[in-house]
Image: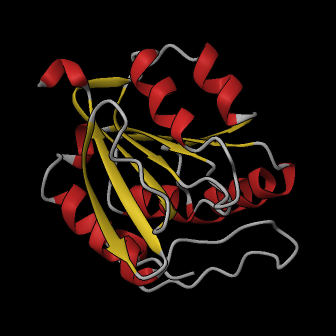
Amino acid sequence: MRIIGGKLKGIRLSAPASLPVRPTTDMAKEALFNILYNTYDFDSCDVLDLFSGTGNISIEFASRGIKSVTSVDKHSGCVYWLESVIKKYELPQITTVKADVFKFLDQHKKSYQIIFADPPYDLPNIPEIAQKVLNNGLLTEHGLLVIEHPSFLKLNFLQGFTETRRYGNSSFSFFENPADE
């Protein structure tokens, strides 16, 4: 994976092949960060990265000067690898949490300006992510939830849905806090 912007721009990171991950493609990541970077003031944003895997998205946020990122993944190998990258590149704004994402969403109380979720594409309960984030008040006013998912999966029926952008076999669905409407 390649960091596409910020202080680590151009650095290539090679996660161990044994990790159960499917990193966001460079094309999709670049498009996503163009949207986010033109919408939010990164140095004052708190981000939640769900199903963080290799930390591809968390590292990109940190490279671009985000205030803080909380990276949640249940796979200890992913968490360990991300922690080694945090240490190597001095990225103190990233905090790792080893946890089941759905349990985390039920118990966590902090709210975020940006929440990104990149669940395994075969996860049957992907729509629950949006429901839990919105119902548990995890988005700030004018906050944004982005769920990466297979393009065949439609999430436009969920509360807070605003749009989907497709990048090949992957899509990003965007959700806003319904209180903002």
Q: Relative to 141, does residue 84 appear above or below in the rendering?
A: below
Q: In screen coordinates, is 49 left or right of 29?
A: right
Which residue is found at the position 14% from the left and 51% from the top? Answer: 39
Q: Quadrant of residue 78?
A: bottom right
Which residue is found at the position 47% from the left and 27% from the top? Answer: 131
Q: In screen coordinates, is 33 left or right of 58?
A: left
Which residue is found at the position 66% from the left and 71% from the top? Answer: 22
Count of all numbered marks drawn on residues in the image: 0
Estimate the x, y position of residue 10 in percent, counting from the top left: 43, 86
The N terminus lies in which quarter of the figure?
A: bottom right
Q: Relative to 142, does residue 138 appear above or below in the rendering?
A: above
Q: In screen coordinates, is 35 left or right of 68?
A: left
Q: In screen coordinates, is 99 left or right of 134?
A: right
Estimate the x, y position of residue 73 in percent, counting from the top left: 70, 45
Q: Nearer the viewer, residue 137 or 155?
A: 155
Q: How is the image coloured?
A: secondary structure
The C terminus lies in which quarter of the figure?
A: top left
Estimate the x, y position of residue 114 in percent, counting from the top left: 34, 41
Estimate the x, y position of residue 15 in percent, counting from the top left: 73, 75
Q: Nearer the viewer, residue 119 or 160?
A: 160
Q: Relative to 88, does residue 174 appear above or below in the rendering?
A: above
Q: Relative to 155, does residue 54 appear above or below in the rendering?
A: below
